[in-house]
Amino acid sequence: MSDAGVIIIGAGHGGGTAAALLRQYGWQGPIRLIGEEPLAPYQRPPLSKAWLKGEADEEALILKPESFYAEAGIELMTGARVAAIEPAAKTVRLESSEAFAYDHLIIATGAKPRRLNIPGADLEGALTLRSAADAETLKAHLGPGKRIAVVGGGYIGLEVAASARYLGSEATVIEKEPRILARVACRTLSDFFTHYHQERGVVFEVSADVTAFEGAVGKVAGVRLGDGQLIPCDVVLVGVGAPPDDQLAVRAGLPCDGGIVVDLEARTADPAIFAIGDVTRRPMPHYGCMFRLESVANALEQARHAAGAITGRPAPAPEVTWNWSDQYDLKYQFAGLPVDIDEVLVRGDPAQAKFAVFHLKGGVIQAVEAVNAPAEFMGGRLLIGQRKPVDLARLADVSVSMKEVAA
Amino acid sequence: MTKITYIEFNGAEHVIDVKPGLSVMEGAVKNNIPGIDADCGGACACATCHVYVQEPWLDKTGEKSAMEESMLDFAENVQDNSRLSCQIKVSGELEGLVVKMPESQH
């Protein structure tokens, strides 16, 4: 072991947390945290929710004050881009051509929003949302009398549509599949969210291809659909997924398969290199498969894996993956992965906007999707982790509490 | 500033000045106090900021919402004085507040 210490590439929620955890876990060597953005690590989830609506300020976004990093002996380099990882030399080279040696490297580069390869994609006002700077630009285009076209009916798109309505904008969501949330939620949830948004003034165009963004004087003014229809708008938000930002790892020769392949310690094929968060493809111990998760909960779990492995802590028990979304007054929480499902069970009443959908395999809960139903979410998450069959009649019966179901 | 004492499960004490308006969770996270994970960042979505509020402050931290109550129901080692620290807003009234952390948030 040299005295080179730990380098973390990517100063997002995962990278920033890994740095802080290393100190909590007693790591005394150098820590260098390198991020492309001008800001210290901050939370991204509020950018489409509370922050966009004006209910959270920058201080609430920032994970820790900038002074923390100096006090904790963490060398935070913002606005710095890494050009290459050189595993044989255990060196990270920046675009500025500065180079730093490491004993342990953590790659936490996250994901980059997918852009559409269509005419007009580069027009001013054709936006994506990942960073605080993106959110700032988007917010300037929202308000009474303004119109937003959202391309992609996933979580980001729906959260932005909800926030845009809250701010007084007109909102149209354009989805290429026959239903919104097609990739990530079941039909019951898609139908529920469609109606909830429609009642609040959002217009949906489903099974709709986007062929071009059309503009006037370089600025976007409309979205052209495959059937020839033009959706007029003042701004477009493209939310059609975010592939892993794994190019540094690919070029360094680390195995990647739609994300950097890691084990349950968040270690890559190179024992000195870890990867955490949205950029990884990881084992799913409850399901016996590999998966790329895109969530804060996953980034933080893997930050604990990497920081724990580097400081010689025993590996923590595997967590059940989960995530959440806030839209209007809805708290949507979901856990697990709906793989190999042979039974789908609804508990509660979608018409009351308080219900949960359980996905089961052989009587064992694989996944739960809960709307305004925190007990169903928490109980479901617990049961997913336990891997034992549940009594379906009791699970479907709202007069039996989730605590009793889980007992 | 409001003085808050955070006590880890192993007994380690951290006395911190927290700005009123922040939550008790944010006071811990922004100062890198171990034992409060706060995965969801304060959205009351995860129950990983569980604390035990010590007397005489329990009443002063206010009522639990139905949401918080449901989340806490499934946290580990819940007691009568359990709260989610993201749901406790820091004010002058909480000067001297003492919270203890459970063994684990996961």
Image: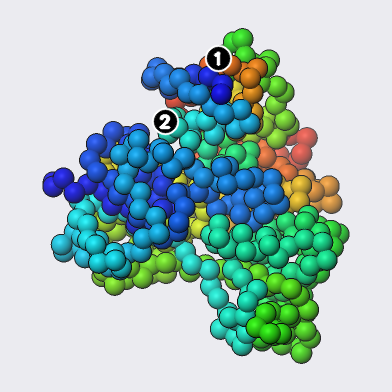
Q: In this orientation, which residue lies closer to the viewer: A209 or B56?
A: B56
Left or right placement of residue A100 versus residue A266 in this view: left
Q: A302 or A9: nearer the eye? A: A9
Q: Compared with residue A20, is residue A165 higher up or lower down, i.e. above or below?
A: below
Q: Amino acid at mark 2?
A: Pro
Chain under numbered label 2: B
Residue A384 lies, in percent from the top left, at: 54, 45
Residue A404, x across and y down, in percent: 66, 31
Q: Alpha-carbon neighbours of circle 2 within 10 Å: few (<14), some, or many (≥20)?
A: many
- Which of the 4 image quarters holds residue A246? bottom left
Dot 1 amino acid type: Gly
- Dot 2 falls on a residue whose secondary structure is loop
Which residue occupies 67% across, 79% down?
A219
Q: How is the image coloured?
A: rainbow
Residue A217: give x, y in percent of width and height: 68, 85
Image vertical order of residue B73 relative to residue A395, above or below: above
Q: Residue furthest left?
A: A2
Label 2 belongs to which residue? B34
Please say if A123 is above or below B102.
Answer: below
Q: Which mark is in front, 1 or 2?
A: 1
Q: Earlier in the sequence, mark 1 or mark 2?
A: 2
Residue drawn at (69%, 49%), measured in percent from left and top? A54
> Which label was assigned to residue B96?
1
Rendering coords of residue A27 (x, y %):
27, 37
Q: Distance of mark 1 from mark 2, alpha carbons?
A: 19 Å
